[in-house]
Structure formats: C-alpha cells, structure tokens
Image (tube, helix red, strand yellow):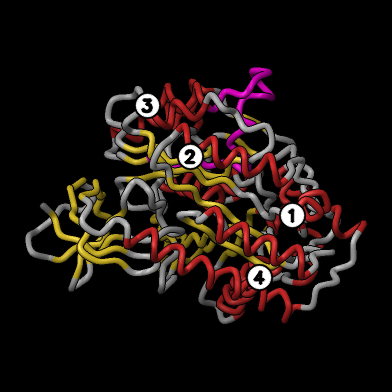
Amino acid sequence: MVKNRIDVVTLGCSKNLVDSEMLMRQLLSNGYTIEHDSDNPQGEIAVINTCGFIGDAKEESINMILSFAEQKKMKKLKKLFVMGCLSERYMEELQQEIPEVDKFYGKFAWKNLISDLGKSYNQELSLERMLSTPSHYAYIKISEGCDRTCSYCSIPLITGKYASRPIEEIEEEVRNLVKSGVKEFQFIAQDLTYYGLDIYKEMKIAELVKRVSDIPGVEWIRLHYAYPAHFPMDLLPVIRDCDNVCKYLDIALQHISDSMLKKMRRNITKEATINLIDRIRTEVPGIHLRTTLMVGHPGETEEDFNELLDFVNDMKFERMGAFPYSHEEDTYCDKNYTDDIAPEVKEERLSKLMEVQEIIALTVNESKIGETLKVIIDSETPDYYIGRTEFDSPDVDGEVLIDKDEPLTIGSFYNVKITSAMPFDLMGTVI
C-alpha cells in the first residue's frame, strides 16, 4: 500500500473519462500521486468511476467495486470511493449491498470527494485535466445530459436535462490543451447536434466547431454522437471546408424499419434517414460515417431485422458498431414493452449484422491500398508503429500498422502509403 497514492479506475464512455481526468487534476494539485487504470493498483485510496448504461456495463462496474472491496477487507486498501453513473442511479441499493465502500457520489457530485479527503477544490484549475490519453489527443465534453426520449435509454434518467457548455469556455479549454501539446480533439456529447439550444436558443454546433478549428495548433477535430432527427445542416460545410475538421461523423441511427423507429421513439423515418445520409455524403465528399445499431428491441420481427440487414448492405457504412437490446429499469420500454426477444436470438442477429459489416469494412479498407494518408502515431510495439487516419477515432475504430523502417515520433503526423488491408486495420509505410 503506497502512502498518498490514489488509484482511479474509469469504466464506461469517454464522457466518464473526462470526469476522471478533472478529478485527477484536482487530486494532483492537492499533493497526491495518481495512477489511472493501473494493472497493479497499490494506492491507499481507490476511486472507481462507474458506468450504468446497459446490463453488461453495470455488471462490469459492480464486479470492479467488489474486487476493490475485497482488497479493503484484506487491509490492502484504506479508503474506497465510488462515483459516476451507476452510483448516481443506484446509490441506496449500492450502499446497502457493498458497505465496504466509504462513500458513493452521484455523477455530478465528485467535487465533494475532494472535500471529504480534507482537501480543497481549486477553481482556477476547473478547465484543466490530468490526461489519461496519450498526450497528443483529448476528449472535449461540450455538454451534459440529454433531452431525447428514446424508448430504451436510461441516460436521461442518470444525467438529467441537456446542458450545453458556453462556447467561450470550450475555446479556453482547447487553448489550454494546445499549450500542453494536444493536437487532436474528439468532441463528445450524448447528442452533439442539440448543442446550444438550451443556452443560445438555436443549434450552435457548426459555430462551435468552426471557432475551435480557427484556434492555432488544433490539427484535428472529430465529432461523436450526432442525432439524425433535425440534423443541423449548417454543420456539413464546416466539415467539408475546414481542413482540420476530420471528414468523419459518428451518428447513431439504431434501426431503419419505420415500425422499429417508431417503437424506439426516434422521431425520424426510414426515408428521412436515407435522405440525410445521401445529403451528408453529397455535401462532404469522402466523409466516413460511423453508426451504431441495435438488435432485439421489443417487437423487432424477423422482417424488421432483415430490413436492417439490407439497409447496412446498401448504405455500406465505413464504420459501424452494434449491440443487443438491454431492458433497463424505468425507461419507456420498461413501462410499456415486454423484453420479448430471446437472448440467443439477439446474439444471432448481432452476429449476422457484424458479419455483413466485416465484409463491408474490408472492402472500404481495400479501396485505400495505394493511397497516401495523413496518419498520427499513437504508440509502438516491437514490430510496428501504431497510428490512425482522420477516419479513425481512438479505441472504437481501426488502426494503421506501420513498418519500423525508420524511427517515428509518437504524437507526430506522417504521410503513410497504404500497402495492405484487413477488415478493421490498415498496413503502410512512411513516405
């Protein structure tokens, strides 16, 4: 047990990661040694930032808490704190079931953890973070919460109403990060496209992206989690015309059959969805679209699923993820539908969908053979440097494996000629 060391574990999405990084910066300023996601936690204090989105994520969070609780029973840990989405949603139950935890904090109450340690929150550091990512990229959380009412989603129950951050505050945060060496910025929100409506009374995502792109030192901006209904079309020329805005958009569609879109309360039709995709691709030539799809939502028939399969085959998304429906307490689904699709059927549909996407992904990657792409270097192995193109977001997309013919610098950009392709990764050489 290392005195004055705190081990912070982050589970779930990149929005949680930003919260952990803000907490770690405050703890660092108060004299603690901080380790994040250590393979060998040895601190006298541990903080677990939990996810509460779907069943698998909740199970992972609970198992992590229990493993640290066991360490505390064995006197290998003095203090154990739990924060984040699971803690926000199930605090009373967790307090009763896992008494080894010294205190649980809601998602937005982590500042109280600092005072409970007898330390002070430093307001002057409110926009600073201790990055857990490689030093050349960072996530920028532009808002909290969500005002959508999708049938299956528990996130609005956890995070509350949509709350945009002021543009000036985000610009200041980006400038500070540029000074510390960050070149690549992943904009994240539960719903990017809603940004600004609450505080400016109009969608401001296009203006935000343009203003940040004008900051010297910003090399790449990448956009995550757009919503298809009422999409702000003024964003498209910004993506097209700003050289440092990646030709990449993460837009979660969930399904395509009209019956499922209605059951999911997505406020869009199949026709409108296809028209939107066509317009995005027309206005931003070469853009790579990432989407997320769901199988096994209550009421999904074989016809609905086959329609989704055909849609994926037709649209040929450059990037795609999928997951099986998870029945969550207090959601619209929980109150109005029965979880009527068998788990094995969900898994079978998920496998079929991803098999189709793997073929599409390989075709997309093979089309890049012979091209020269701008690549940022993230890391190295004994055999390869590992980088990404503008079409690849960290952790969720593919990578470029580069022969170690010459020494390269982590965090720098290089022109890489693509020599071969796999379904989700590329191989290349620096030219």
Marking on residue 56: 4
Q: Amino acid at mark 2?
A: Arg
Q: Estimate the spatial distance between the alpha carbons at disc 3 and disc 1, rounded to whole Å.
A: 33 Å
State the extent of the magenta-drawn residues as a range. 185-205
Q: Amino acid at mark 3?
A: Asp
Residue at disc 3, secondary structure: helix
Q: Which quadrant is home to the N terminus?
A: bottom left
Q: Estimate the spatial distance between the alpha carbons at disc 3 and disc 4, rounded to whole Å.
A: 40 Å
Crowding at mark 4 (Cα within 10 Å: few <14, some 14-19, many 20+) = few
Q: Quadrant location of residue 184?
A: top left
Is 423 in front, or is 285? Answer: 285
Is 70 in front, or is 421? Answer: 421
Instruction: Say left or right for 169 vs 325.
Output: left
Q: Amino acid at mark 4?
A: Asp
Q: Quadrant location of residue 99?
A: bottom right
Query: Closer to the observer: label 1 or label 4?
Result: 1
Q: Is residue 191 magenta?
A: yes
According to the picture, the residue beneath numbered tag 1 turns out to be 257
Instruction: Say left or right for 281 vs 113.
Output: left
| Contact (Cβ within 8 Å) of mark 1 with mark 4 | no
Q: Is residue 196 magenta?
A: yes
Among the two numbered marks 3 and 1 on one chain, the one whose residue lies closer to the N terminus: 3
Crowding at mark 1 (Cα within 10 Å: few <14, some 14-19, many 20+) = many
| Contact (Cβ within 8 Å) of mark 2 with mark 4 | no
Among the two numbered marks 3 and 2 on one chain, the one whose residue lies closer to the N terminus: 3
Is 284 in front, or is 404? Answer: 284
Q: How many marks?
A: 4
